Amino acid sequence: MPAAQPSMTAFALRPRLSAMAAMSAVGLGLLIAPAGIATADPAKSTTTSTSSRQAPDSLFPEVGSSRYNVKHYAIKLSYQTSGEIKAKTTVIAKTKKPLKSFSLDLEGLTVDAVKVNGDRADFSRRDNKLIIKSSKVLDGRFSVTIKYHGKPVTHIDPDGAKDGWIPTADGGVVVLSEPVGAMTWFPNNNTPRDKATFDMKITVPAKLEAAGSGDLRSVRKHDGLETWRWVQPKQQATYLAMIAIDNFDVYRSTMTTTTGRKLPIWSFIEPELGTQATARALIPKAIRYMERRFGAYPFNSAGIVVKDSDVDYALETQNRPVFDIDEGETVRELTNVHEWAHQWYGNSVTLSDWGDIWLNEGFATYAEWLWTASHGGQSTAERLQTEYDANPADDELWSPAPADFSNPADLFGSQGYLRGAMTLEVLQQEVGSRDFFVILRRWAQDNEYGNVSTREFIALSERVSGEDLDALFQAWLFTVGKPALS
Ligand SMILES: [Zn+2]
């Protein structure tokens, strides 16, 4: 996710957390802990023990389960223009220890029936949990099928942003689920550390189109309806699964990667927003640019979705980022670049805990700096100095520390984005650019389709450079306050 498009300028990066939203979060009692002045021990701060807890995430303990691993989601969803859906989701999972009952995350909607391994199962709802009791003990691989219907709700995040199922003014819908909105449209294990493959069959009235994350397998016409099948053969976190339903113009083309691979490109543009030809032309350029720096593009197709949805942010949904613009606007080049960088850092290499958001946003912001430097703008070193000078010690940029969040409302603050990118440039200056780019490439390659932590990034940086980098990361990632810049 990048900063809100209209307010983002070169030297004043302010992501989606507005002052108003921050105040309302405080007003709602969501501010869990004030930013402390003590510094944190990196080893402790970045390791979240899950062995004894059912909830895996430090910032969103109410979602996710660590008692099983999901392998695959099969989602069949039928959308009516009234805004109602009728759906069936099958989850293929594997237990970690034998279990008789387990929970999936689901907010809103009415559950009609649940089957476990083909047998009807009892279920109940509590808060945003669907609790399922199997008639037999589950040990190893199992499947659960949930039939449900209703008008999905939109989840509101601690920072006030819309998340999950988002109806739009023109009668369409867009699903943008970072961090926890995926539970508004299908039951799932809603933690980024449990990635899975997906198969989505989205049925819409024939006058509409259904965009999705993954690769388009077929569009089948039947009885005045169309079923769009989107298959994701690569691991995907639930927050990166996307559908967007509207009267779109669909653009299809093919690109060649730097390794000679042919990738289909499917883009979906709201007709009132023009053709967005410049934004679409950037896709192959951005992918090849990043392949030369970060390694092979990790997925099998690409594209963009451009829609006036009033969410005021873009999202790096897998294969196919979604951009929110108003009529007369074009997708901002650096926002587009930012979302493509996330396909490596965020989507293929995914954080294990939301407290490590800088591993997503610091890297994608740094990719913007690299792109700017390669296209006649400031060098990354000049950019670091500019940002350092522009942000006084009392600026919110310096508190909380980017890898030591305790308040979920801070998730999209400047600390993870801008201070995260500054940390990477400081690292480059310390280890030299040759080792630095080895680190970036190996981070993407060694962890392809996997999950990572800050501790692992520090360990890799030390291994590649042969340097002790504890002091650098302690100052830039774990300590509140403006670090010294030599
Ligand atoms: Zn981002």
Image (cartoon, rainbow, N blue to C red):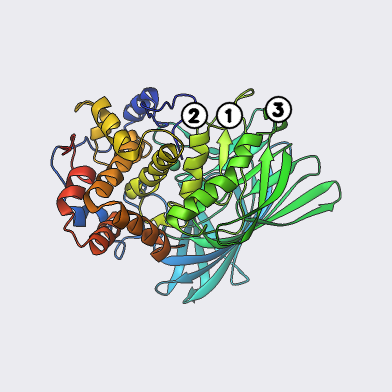
Residue closer to the observer: 369 or 18: 369
Give residue 359's position: percent from left, percent from top: 35, 49
Q: Residues within 10 Å of mark 2 (few under 14, many from 20)?
A: many
Mark 2 = which residue? 5
Residue closer to the observer: 72 or 53: 72
Circles 2 and 1: CB distance less than 8 Å? Answer: yes
Mark 1 = which residue? 325
| Looking at the image, residue 162 lies above or below residue 215 | above
Residue 125 seen anywhere in this rendered image of the structure: no
Mark 2 or mark 1: name the one nearer the start of the chain: 2
Q: Is residue 481 left or right of residue 419?
A: left
Amino acid, disc 2: Gln
Mark 3 = which residue? 272
Label 1, ligand 1: CB separation under 8 Å: no
Amino acid, disc 1: Ile
Residue at the location (25% across, 31% down)? 388
Label 2, ligand 1: CB separation under 8 Å: no
